[in-house]
Amino acid sequence: MSLDSFQMQELNTKLNSVLKSLVAPFSGELTGAIVDSKGELVQVIGSDPLHFATPEAVIKSLKKYVVPKVGELFVTNDPGSGNTRLCDLLFIQACYGRSQAGDLRYYLVLQIGVPTLLNKKLDKMATSIEDEGFRVPPAPFEDENGLNEAIVDYLCQAGISRDNLIQKVNEAKSSLKTAIHRLSLLETQMGAEKLNSGIAALRKYSEKSMKKAIHEIPDGEYTAHDFLDNDGIEKTPVRIQCRLSVQGENILVSFQGSSKQVKGPFNCNYAMTLSTCFWFFRCLLKHDIPINSGAFNAFVVEAPEGTIVNGTGPAPMLGGYYETSNRIADVLIGCLSKALPLETPALNGSSSNITLMKFKDKVMIDTLGSGAGASKSKDGSDAINASLHNTPASSIEDIESDYPIQVIHSGIRDGSGGEGRHKGGDGLSRGYKFLEPGFVMMLSDRRDYKPHGIFGGSAGLSGENILNRSGEKKKLHNEKNVFAVKPNDTLVINTPGGGAWGKVVEPSKEET
Amino acid sequence: MSWQIAANIREMFVDLVATDGKQAFACRSANRKDSLISGFNEALVTLPPIDRTTVVLAISSDFERVALRERWGATTALLATEGFENVLEIGNQSREKLFSFQPSKPTPLISHDLSFGVTERTLANGLVEVNLDEKEIDFVLSKLSLSEIKSIAICLLHSNKNKSHELQLASRVREKGYFVSCSHEFEGNEQVRFKKAAQKSFIGPVLEEFHNEFEKLGFTKKNIDLAADFRKSGDGDQIFITCLEDRIITALVRDGKRIARKRLKVSPLSMMGLDEAGMAHVGPAKVGSEPGPVILGKGLALTYFDTLAYSSKLTLDDSPRIKFDQSRVQRVLAPLAKQLRVTPESCAEMFNELGAVYIATEISLLMEEFHFSHVDCKVTFDGWFANLMATPIISKSAFRKFDVEVLSQWSPTIGLLKEIPKGAFEKLTERGSCKFSSKILDGETHEP
């Protein structure tokens, strides 16, 4: 063992500080990343694991369109180019290291949330990416001549004022400048060569750590499948099939046998599927690691092009981000439950229960937690972001202050968790009363296929969406739906509970 | 001048200073987590006999933080707008760990069974849509009387826009003798306000008991300030870095006004060792006095405190009552040093360096968040680690050029006094202070 153990941790801390200074001025779900000139991930931080494979994927796409030069700023929000959602706007800054003039050495990637980019009509279920909002493929955004006005004008069509947009852009640029300064300082302190070898050591370390964790899975082939209820267009279930092949530290995840990509907005691109697999394997690790290309090199993912897990072309993907990714996580956990049955919890409610509500130029996005699956040692948690995403719930007061909505209740959905020796967590119930006419788009899942329990524990209740119009309550049978709402309509969303672990222990006769 | 006493009551130690304008005393004593008053008591007996009823007592303590962490609070009920009784349990629905197959959230301070809904509704514009129902309040109060509740948090939607319902309800609840806190006392949306109101209600009664402990020692209630703050002032942009035993408090001050304050826990810097893939890790997260520094005979997980003390960078010249057990640290450090093929002394130094990187990084990120210049800013270090932390922190940081001043170990406690008599603590501040005060350029120290 060498002294590099400490130097690696020091470099890890410093790279993290570059990324923290990149995202610090912003709030919400953010991702910051450094990618090297070859397009390999140096380090990424963020609150949503589904974004972690995005920086590499987007830079790969960017290079198809342009040859980036030092100092140029690029922008994109295109899921077709490896991004996640249209409302995640990515700024990519090409930069050099310590020298004032030199070769391109790094890309700094900053992702910020701009919900108005989903501000299309929302009057029908999307069947192409263009239906989901305003799409910007990777493009130069600023060079020595100033901002790309065509992109600025296009983004302003989404309803964001020019002043607001320019303010956001300036904030992003200021953050990128600070991060570049920090990165340059780091290179000055360490020297370019030492920094490169340090980055290589961190990649090797992350790969080794992930492989060690994977090695805990016994050798073998494990398969599992699950379904999305439907894609919102065709009323047939959408299959996700997974095979985990483990041999020592080598692991292959194959999604052969999964449904073809769908018409509705429930496709995942390859980067989303890769991020989900990373999340799954990272959960096996007991300590933190730097998230870099080495961590992703520890496993191989086979996701056939043109399937639900690797949608191509103009495939719409918003529901893929929120729901299909959760189901991919479920099948991976399903495989693990065959390899390490006692170590694996029952299924989570694992639906983001996303609802978009549009009133004139405003779009509100609310995601609601579900019940968590129980394990051999404890009950599942109630009303929690149970699987992949970790989006904070919208504040009730903020919703009511910013949108023509009154929240009529928000509480735990009692009794929705599965019954068993350890009970599944209960889901959540939230009701909205609409005060103005508008449109609602629901992309929720787990309304037909329940989150199952294990070792005899029962499944959690599936979710349900109930519309109350003029005193008449109607359970919406199509949980993926777009409909107009009138003032005084109410919508109640009951999210799924988690599966239970083990059979309920009946009291003995003597105890009775 | 009447006697003034200031005490800095932490989980592991208590620093106490006292003066009547002519004489000055200082004492550091060990403390106990389960009785934070014990270290204060021990320090108090070292003072000459004084009339405590007239003493002006300034206390800065960890009591609230420890009480919340250890769940020492009173049995508390929640009264919330009907339909939103689970608001504390739901929180913001985020899980604690991003990477976990079985996610969890912190357990709320108020249990599900003690959360009650009250019919009322205030709208986002502050208008009342549904009035409180007096009969229902009577009914809820009668239910509360059946349990062992001592305290109540009142959390009604949009009370920050119109507090009338919370005030009305609070007045009825107080009549029954409960400790009450309302969410309109705090800023932010309901997720923030409700949580703070619950915390205040939960620890309110035990905080009163803590207050009473000082009265039992003979001090007069009106002369006790339990929330004294370290004095920070000056012109322009200044950073005050107060190094305490288990955390570092960074205060950003602009023209004498504090604009930001951040606690950096030193506890995450406790040592875990090397993982299987060869990276040095720090942890566990919870140290404080539980289990506590190895060098004080508490636990076996090395802390930053241990490695600093082991490297003889942390001295206790003014604290004969506290003994360091270097051999204990040596025993824990030896296997790790062997693994790294270095001496225990080098191993401790390496860990000290890593800690400085962590602290420097966090401080400079805080500066960026509040747009503090990295060029012309005066930095003042005080507290226990001050004399040994200043150089590594500055040299490891992204700072460019600073005026650095390092004050003594006793400065934070002396700073709690309402009035500091001229010259009273001269010897004490001289003894602990560091000699350098210089410009530091590009990470290199230039001694004067």
Image (cartoon, coloured by chain):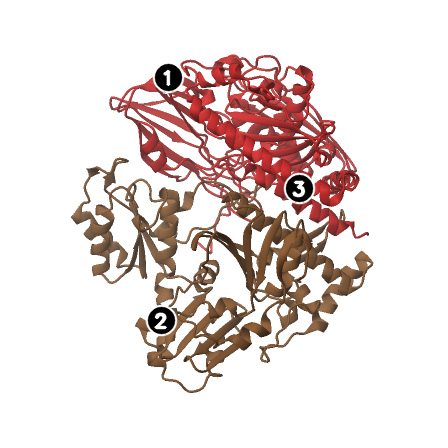
Between A357 and A27, the residue placed more toward the observer is: A27
- Of residues A312 and B430, the one drawn nearer to the viewer in this rendering: B430
Marks counted in the figure total 3
Residue under circle 1? A483
Vertical side of A395 occupied by B76: above or below = below
Toward the front, the furthest residue is B448
> Which percent across, then down, holds residue A232?
48, 17
Camera-near label (3 vs 1) is 3
Q: Residue at x 70, y 48 (%)?
A: A9
Parent chain of label 1: A
Q: Is residue B129 left or right of residue A383?
A: left
Q: Is residue B137 visible?
A: yes
Q: Are the residues flagged by discs 1 and 2 from a single subunit? A: no
Residue topped by disc 2: B224
In the rendered image, residues at marks 3 and 1 fall on the same chain = yes
Circle 3 residue = A15
**Residue A238 numbered mark, or none:** none
| x and y percentages locating residue B358 in the rendered image | 63, 52
Q: Earlier in the sequence, mark 3 or mark 1?
A: 3
Mark 1, secondary structure of its residue: strand
Which one of the lettered chains is coloured red? A
Residue A399: quarter of image: top left
User: Chain ID for label 3?
Assistant: A
Give the chain letter for brown. Answer: B
- C-alpha span from label 3 to label 1: 47 Å
Residue type (three-letter) at the residue carrying disc 2: Ile
Mark 3 lies on a secondary structure that is helix
Chain of the residue under the numbered disc 2 shown in the image: B
Residue B332 vs A6, above or below: the answer is below
